[in-house]
Image (cartoon, rainbow, N blue to C red):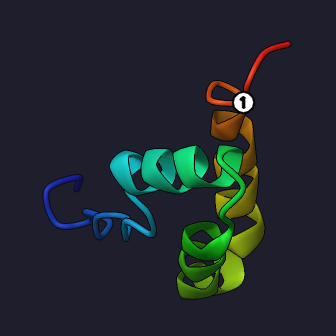
Amino acid sequence: MGLFSRKPAPTVIATGAEIDVAAKALAAGNDTLANQLCDRAGSDRQRVAMAILGRSLDYAPQD
């Protein structure tokens, strides 16, 4: 039965707001927040790093 076979809710590794703040800082040249967030992510660090890098493109200065 579906009633008793529920899976636990997924663990949130990094919120969108945290990724956004780290991306803004990374675009400004500061990698401290991005490194801290990736270190905290553990085995999901590559996924978090790619999310930060992708989001930082929105904040990169345009020539």
Name the residue at 70% across, 74% down: 45
Above or below, comparing residue 39 to residue 30 in the picture: below
Q: Which residue is mark 1?
A: 60
For mark 1, does the 10 Å Cα neighbourhood hold few (<14), some (14 to 19), or many (20 or more) residues? Answer: some
- How far from the left and from the top, in percent, is residue 6? 25, 62
- How far from the left and from the top, in percent, is residue 60? 72, 30
- How far from the left and from the top, in percent, is residue 35? 66, 77
Query: Farthest residue toward the right?
Result: 63
Name the residue at 64% across, 61% down: 48
Q: Nearer the viewer, residue 35 or 40?
A: 35
- Taking 45 as reference, is 14 left or right? left
- Taking 62 as reference, is 15 left or right? left
- How far from the left and from the top, in percent, is residue 42? 63, 87
Q: Amino acid at mark 1?
A: Ala
Query: Farthest residue toward the left?
Result: 3
Q: Which quadrant of the view contains residue 27?
A: top right
Above or below, comparing residue 6 to residue 42 in the picture: above
Name the residue at 62% across, 29% down: 59
**Image quadrant for the N terminus?**
bottom left
**Image quadrant for the C terminus?**
top right
- Taking 62 as reference, is 26 left or right? left
